[in-house]
Amino acid sequence: MIRKAIPNDIVHIVNLENKVFTQTLGETFLYDEFMLNPFSHYFVIEEHNQFIGYIGFRAFDENSEMMNFAIDPEHQHQGYGSKLLLFGLEHLNSLGVKTLVLEVRKSNKNAIEFYEKFGFIQSHIRKNYYEKEDAIVYIKEV
């Protein structure tokens, strides 16, 4: 089941980010996104009341930025990421968004392959975006 994220999901999101990434957006950032930022759109995917993953966007005018996207490693390569991304793209489309931008670590070959499979096009490189690692910026027309 995919649903809108709520403040009670923050602890699950932070735990997942710590498991998947080397850093987390953090509880305060996520709380502010959920409660104060009218441009933020976060969704979670669950199965049998188990937290599987989440995706977050900021959408403004015809543009959107993916803030973060993570699927629990135990549930990767089972279609959850694809379902969640497609849901997010449909949601952005319903808002009138035309362009989605995201950054991915240059070393994250699995994410690069995943995004390219869904038609994301490499735009440019952001040097040292992840402290000492470059990010590839991808763009997709929604």
Image: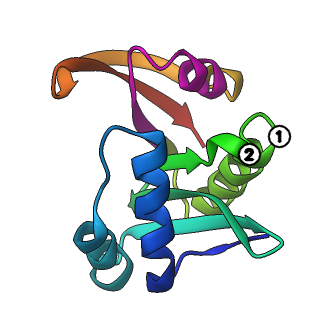
Which residue is at a point 38% across and 15% down the rendered structure image?
106
Residue at image mark 1: 78
Q: Nearer the viewer, residue 18 or 97?
A: 18
- 66 vs 95, left or right, is left
Identify whether 8 is placed above or below 49: below
In the rendered image, residue 83, in percent from the top left (x then y), is placed at: 77, 50
Which residue is at a point 71% across and 57% down the rendered structure image?
87
- 133 vs 118, left or right, is left
Circle 2 residues within 10 Å: few <14, some 14–19, many ≥20 = few
The magenta segment is 100-115
- 122 vs 24, left or right, is right
Circle 1 residues within 10 Å: few <14, some 14–19, many ≥20 = few
Residue at image mark 2: 75
Q: Nearer the viewer, residue 93 or 45?
A: 45
- 18 vs 89, left or right, is left
Quadrant of the rendered image containing residue 134: top left
Label 1 secondary element: loop
Look at the numbered discs 1 and 2 and tell me whether their residues touch, using CB distance below 8 Å.
Answer: yes
Quadrant of the rendered image containing residue 45: bottom right
Identify whether 26 is placed above or below 74: below
Answer whether residue 49 is magenta in the image.
no
- Three-letter amino acid code at disc 2? His
Label 2 secondary element: helix
Which residue is at a point 64% across and 40% down the rendered structure image?
73
In the rendered image, residue 16, in percent from the top left (x then y), is placed at: 50, 55
Identify whether 96 is placed above or below 30: above
- Three-letter amino acid code at disc 1? Gln
Which corner quadrant holds the N terminus?
bottom right
In the rendered image, residue 118, in percent from the top left (x then y), is placed at: 69, 29
Answer whether residue 106 is magenta in the image.
yes
